Amino acid sequence: YKSVDAGKTWTHLGLRDGQQIPQIVVDPKDPNRLFVAVLGHPYGPNEERGIYRSTDGAKSFQKVLYKDENTGGIDVVFDPGNANIVYAVLWEARQGPWENGAFQGPNSGVFKSIDGGTTWKLITKGLPTFAGDGLGRIGITVAPSEPKRLFATVDATRKAGLYRSDDGGENWYLANGDPRYTSRGSDFAEVKVHPKDADIVFTGSIVAWRSTDGGKSFTAFRGAPGGDDYHRIWIDPTNPDIILLAADQGAIITVNGGRTFSSWYNQPTAQFYHVVTDNAFPYRVCGGQQESGSACVSSRGPYGQITFRDWTPVGVEEYGYVAPDPLNPDIVYGGRVSRFDRRTGQVQQVGPVAARTPDYRVVRTQPVLFSTIDPRTLYFASNVVWKTLNGGSSWTQISPDLARKTWSVPPTVGKYTGTDAARVTQRGVVYTLAPSYLDINRIWAGTDDGLIHVTIDGGRSWSDVTPPDLKPWAKVSIIDASHFHAGTAYAAVNTIRLDDLRPHIYRTRDGGKTWTHITNGIPEGATINTVKEDPVRAGLLFAGSETQVYFSIDDGDHWQSLRQNMPAISIRDLVIKDDDLVLGTHGRGFWILDDITPLRQMAAKAPDEVHLFTPQRATRVRWNLNTDTPLPQEEPAGENPPDGAILNYYLKSKPAGPVTLEILDGSGAVVRSYSTADAAEPIRDEGNVPAYWIRPAQILSAEPGMHRFVWDLHYAKPQGMQGAFPIAAVFRNTVRSPHGVWALPGTYSVRLTVDGKSVSRPFRLRMDPRVNTPGVALQHQFALSTQLSAAMDVVGRKRVTGDRDEAELARLHGELLAIYNLVQASDVA
């Protein structure tokens, strides 16, 4: 891809079938000249591999260095002093579908071109060989201050380490053979040299290393005991004290040569494997994440946004499932199997002891989840299914080994079929479990080697109900049992390990006897990781791919994108919690789509000229409980859900006149009224309140399309006063106080009027379930607040007309406001 506006927009240039592009270098003196290292398919052979060159700004590419369909480009660098000298690395590497490490071959090596990439010479004198040393991946760099000096990290069975050349790659010698500094080549091959001192060398492994003597010795200058996994290093060529490191958790920067670093917690880069929610209010979103352990974060922060105050680890290993206890959200299970008590912070291992013996198999991500019917029943899966009724104190095996007993090596393994690694017998595991929502004895199980089983008698017997076209080592990544029909289930199947990126979703309506492939509308290449059925509306499905989320309103017969404002990112799992869609991404953290009720109400036919959707139940929650100085705007924060009732409407075309939206109470009286003719209050600096604190005004829209408007659950604020911004501000989300009177819990309706025609929909407003204030007390609060608001209205109007002493009116108004705010905050019992 290429951007000409600093990354705001991108244009696809080509090389799509390369699938993995680890390096792009651009000639510093000619931006139209660039080289691209294309590694190729990880699980199969393909022609679009090697080193490509463009001389016309990527309008076209030429393959300038290529070996075969199994060997790809992994690195390419310019000589800093002469852009016609280019170094490139080829790596013959492929993965097997059972993930037992890369297959490697003899075509790996370092190459050099002295004519701008037209011809290449293999330069491996002194480096390990494949035949004698098991040569693997290589990473290369050139010293900017001494271009003849090169360093290379070399992965090999023998003689691995950091290699150095002082004659432009013609001869190499082992500078340091300590494996800590280069680590495993399947993950690491990063080496960089200080731009002004050729003896200062940096490498990346589970920690970041620095040498000041040309690679003879190293010191760890960034890392942690458990390993941070540093994959990329960038050094500012003009100020070498500025160094950027990219790790599994995110990117960090030092501006003082590594003495101190910024935090990776200022960027949403969490890599989650699965996502789940608990039954607390507000509900928490939980998952296991790469390198940074487990996380549970509140879906609503008490101080107007979601911050570090609302996040806690829950004792689950980084790859693991998380399973909050349905009866006690302070107890959380996960991993293989751990039990976390939020009250004490203690973690206890409670998994089946037998599962740790050689007779049983597990992988990184093993299912741990509660029964959807009996909240005491917890399931765990290895290559068999386990069940506990007492929190893991004892376990019962309720299935035989459900993985394939025999299978052949998939054709995509190609020429590596006869290698020792491919001949090793590999066995699958149960990768997904789906207990029925309707029948406690029905459980679905899917394996990562391509089988689906179901039991209808609680595990006493299991039936193989695998779709006929499911090939061995197709990963059944998620099965979801229907909420409406016991014999209906949905399966997401990921076939990337068979070199197949096509989407695969299956549906059965007869208990697995027959399956239908349902991916119409999902593009080719959109590998699917997960599929879930909405628990409220039959036929509404959601699916997550490697780039975005999709939905279907006809039980999977047709799909369309629901990406909205999300980045292109791997959706590993999703869950529907109440009226929200919650996503777990592998690289951009958790995301929530608030209020999917419009999707539930969508019909197959096009909507009318004007359509008002029935709102979800609203909850009266104090949006910001902070009473003092807020967190600075530099602190990273997630967004709270909208603070009020979410109102959705659709306009097929632009109306002739203004559109109005009114909130009515149970008696039909208008509580609040909005119009497209309302003027937006401009955002401007307010004395000591910089503009970046202020929430943009919400204006009703009359444009064609779908629209969302939020009523803040208040009556109109007292008139005749401008109000002020509170000390407890929220970045870009602060509104003037005071608000109007709180609306009472009860029944309301929303009325949409377009060109003289009105449509109304009812909705409920409930009190925050954590608040125990009696209804009669809320009535008293409402009555007193209403009276005070009316008094402030009178005083405010008199101040505007100036018919009394301004100082006296200001004093009276201030006293009324203080009492009003006190009364409005009294519903906290």
Image: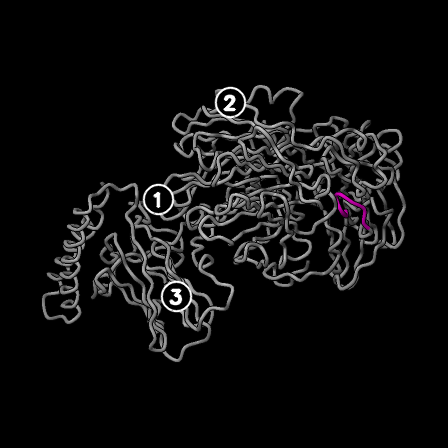
The residue type indicated by label 3 comes to Leu
The residue tagged 2 is: 350
Q: Secondary structure at mark 1?
A: loop
Front-most of residues 309 and 610: 610
Name the residue located 64 percent from the left edge and 45 percent from the top edge: 493
The residue type indicated by label 1 comes to Pro
Confirm whether the magenta stretch covers residue 45: yes
Q: Position of residue 115 (x, y in %)?
A: 87, 54
Q: Main secondary structure of the magenta part?
A: loop
The residue tagged 3 is: 612
Q: Position of residue 729 (x, y in %)?
A: 34, 51
Q: Secondary structure at mark 3?
A: strand
Name the residue located 58 percent from the left edge and 27 percent from the top edge: 225
Q: Choose mark 3 or mark 1, whichever is in front.
A: 3
Confirm whether the magenta stretch covers residue 64: no
Name the residue located 40 percent from the left edge and 69 percent from the top edge: 701
The residue type indicated by label 2 comes to Val
Q: Choose mark 2 or mark 1, whichever is in front.
A: 2
Front-most of residues 290 and 431: 431
Residue 185 vertical placement versus 813 (above, below):
above
Q: Position of residue 491 (x, y in %)?
A: 60, 45
Q: Which residues are magenta?
A: 39-46
Residue contact between numbered discs 3 and 1, judged by CB atoms under 8 Å: no
